[in-house]
Image (cartoon, grey):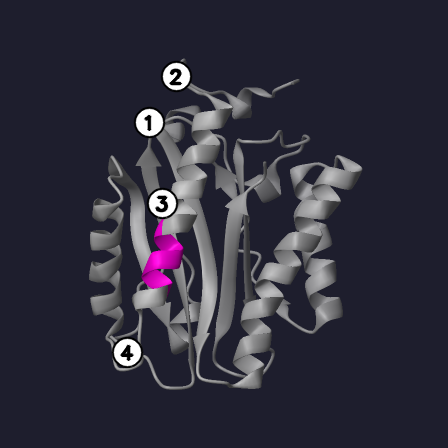
């Protein structure tokens, strides 16, 4: 592996531990999603998520747990939710978790729906579909980080969704990755190696007040 300085890791870094942390994060997301129900407040779902992580023996949270309902699915990571909405019978929500297992940073996110609203279901599915397209482009063509998000924007437009380019992926590694100052994946002018970067996809419905989010480790 030919790594750039922005891909620096600590002495404890291990790709198998990285993948384990990621798999545990996905397990937590799936457990939480199954327990979120219509009538629940966004804040209640967030507290439930903290309990799920604790029950799975995570070592610590390395970024704040996010659960977004309805129109709050348009908010970026750094934006606060608007109010404390109640999840409806036909609604959309996403979960974004970042927790540490075996000294390594897991980070994953996905969008879910309640009820049978076809546009919401299509939006949630599109975020995952777009992620898969971009990840395949990374694997098949060995492209740089900048190109990944150019490609993501092109594909999102072709699919009929608006890509939020304020969200452009980031580094992970053994905790804490922040000491390496890797920056955003979408600004990285080199080929991103496996097991070091989170590809983030956030889209908005072109005319309705909600969106969808999906992120996973490029591995």
Q: Quadrant of the N terminus?
A: top right
- Circle 1 — which element? loop
Of callouts 2 and 1, the N-terminal one: 2
Q: Residue 103 bears which disc, if any?
A: 1
Tell me the distance, in whole angstroms, between the alpha carbons under discs 2 and 1: 8 Å
Distance from Cα at disc 4 to Cα at disc 3: 23 Å
For this view, does 54 lie left or right of residue 69? left
The answer to whether mark 4 and mark 1 are in CB contact below 8 A is: no
First in sequence, mark 4 or 1: give its number. 4
Disc 2, SS: loop
Q: Nearer the viewer, mark 4 or mark 1?
A: 1
Dot 4, how many residues are within 10 Å of its Cα: few (below 14), some (14-19), or many (20+)? Answer: some
Highlighted magenta segment, given as a residue range: 28-33
Q: Which mark is residue 12?
A: 2
Q: Is residue 31 visible?
A: yes
Label 2–label 1 contact, CB within 8 A: yes
Instruction: Identify the mark nearer the N-term, 1 or 3.
Output: 3
Q: Which residue is mark 3?
A: 98
Kindly identify the residue that appears in the image at 52 percent across and 57 percent down.
214
Pointer 3 local density, CA inside 10 Å: few below 14, some 14–19, many at least 20: many
């Amino acid at each position: 592996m030919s790594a750039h300085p922005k891909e620096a890791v600590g002495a404890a870094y291990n790709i198998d531990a990285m993948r384990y942390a990621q798999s545990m994060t996905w397990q937590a997301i799936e457990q939480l999603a199954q327990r979120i129900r219509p009538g629940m407040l966004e804040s209640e779902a967030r507290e439930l998520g903290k309990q799920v992580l604790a029950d799975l023996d995570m070592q610590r949270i390395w970024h704040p747990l996010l659960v977004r309902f309805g129109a709050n699915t348009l908010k970026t990571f750094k934006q606060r939710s608007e109010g404390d909405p109640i999840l409806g019978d036909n609604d959309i929500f996403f979960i974004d978790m970042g927790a540490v297992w075996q000294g390594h940073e897991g980070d994953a996110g996905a969008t879910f729906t309640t009820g049978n609203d076809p546009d919401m279901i299509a939006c949630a599915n599109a975020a995952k579909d777009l992620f898969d397209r971009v990840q395949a482009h990374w694997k098949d063509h060995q492209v740089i980080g900048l190109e990944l998000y150019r490609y993501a924007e092109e594909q999102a437009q072709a699919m009929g969704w608006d890509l939020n380019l304020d969200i452009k992926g980031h580094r992970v590694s053994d905790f804490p990755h922040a000491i390496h100052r890797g920056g955003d994946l979408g600004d990285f002018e080199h080929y991103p190696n496996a097991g070091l970067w989170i590809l983030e996809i956030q889209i908005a419905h072109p005319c309705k007040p909600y969106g969808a989010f999906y992120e996973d480790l490029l591995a």
